Amino acid sequence: MYQHVLQILYNAPFKVSQETENSFFHANVHTLQEASSLPRNTRISVKGTIQTVSPVKQGASYQLQFCDIQDDNNKKVRVNLWGDKCQHNIPDPGTSVLIENVVTTVYQDNMVLTATPETAFLESKVPSTSDNVTIISISEKRGDVTFFDQQDKEYVTTLDIVSTNIHCKTIKDIVPLLPLPVTITMTTKAGKNIVTTITVDDRSEDNFNDPLHE
């Protein structure tokens, strides 16, 4: 003969510690190398530079978008965004980011990261630096300008920045002035020295009034 046991379940709010809440909404940051050795379904945050961003792939019963990130040690990992998580605004390639609250998974023996409803792409602030350099060579292609200094260090910028700050119409106007001492402000992203401002040194300004350069 069976006995029926009556169970009364009681639901009530419970307190979550601040540490537990922080670990959920702001998961611990791991390097990509560390992430590759963590157990499946570990909730983490990672830092890196966006390398590629895929278009959204629409299947019969799914949506998928992914991005590849790479760290300073050239370790690369894919981040998958499924379903409505494809609505995330993924920063452009070359942007340094902190990606919060992703989960480790394995696909074809490779570690990949999967977005969660709490995933956030936070752009890292890249510090600016100023430096005095001498432009030895300069070239332009479709509005993108590349120049090298006396140390054979490469810099990239735009034709608008160059023409506005050096007061020239084309790159050909600068060539007769080389070598050209300038002061630059730049940031470094994905290993590239991106120049945001250029100021011609006082001694270079005289060249613009030199009859030999007219």
Image (tube, rainbow, N blue to C red):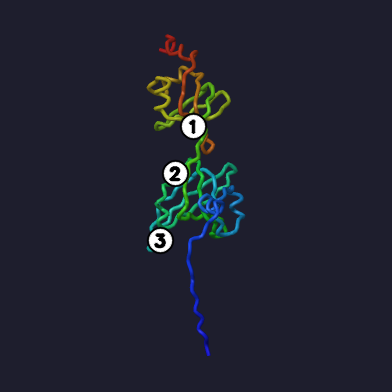
| Amino acid at the residue labelled 3 | Tyr
The Cα–Cα distance between marks 2 and 1, rounded to whole angstroms, is 17 Å
Secondary element under disc 3, as helix, strand or loop, is: loop
Instruction: Of the two numbered discs 2 and 3 on the same chain, state the one appearing first in sequence.
Output: 3
Q: Is residue 59 left or right of residue 50?
A: left
Compute the Cα span from label 1 to label 3: 39 Å
Numbered badge on residue 194: 1
Residue that carries the numbered disc 3 in the rendered image: 62
Q: Earlier in the sequence, mark 1 or mark 3?
A: 3
Query: Three-letter amino acid code at disc 1?
Result: Ile
Q: Is residue 103 above or below residue 160?
A: below
Q: Earlier in the sequence, mark 2 or mark 1?
A: 2
- Residue sitting nearer the eye, 187 or 20: 20
What x and y, as percent, mark residue 190? 52, 39
Q: Residues within 10 Å of mark 2 (few under 14, many from 20)?
A: some
Mark 2–mark 1 CB contact (< 8 Å): no
Please name the residue that numbered disc 2 is placed on: 91
Secondary element at image label 2: loop
Q: Type of residue at label 2?
A: Pro
Q: Residue at the spot x=51%, y=35% of the render? A: 126
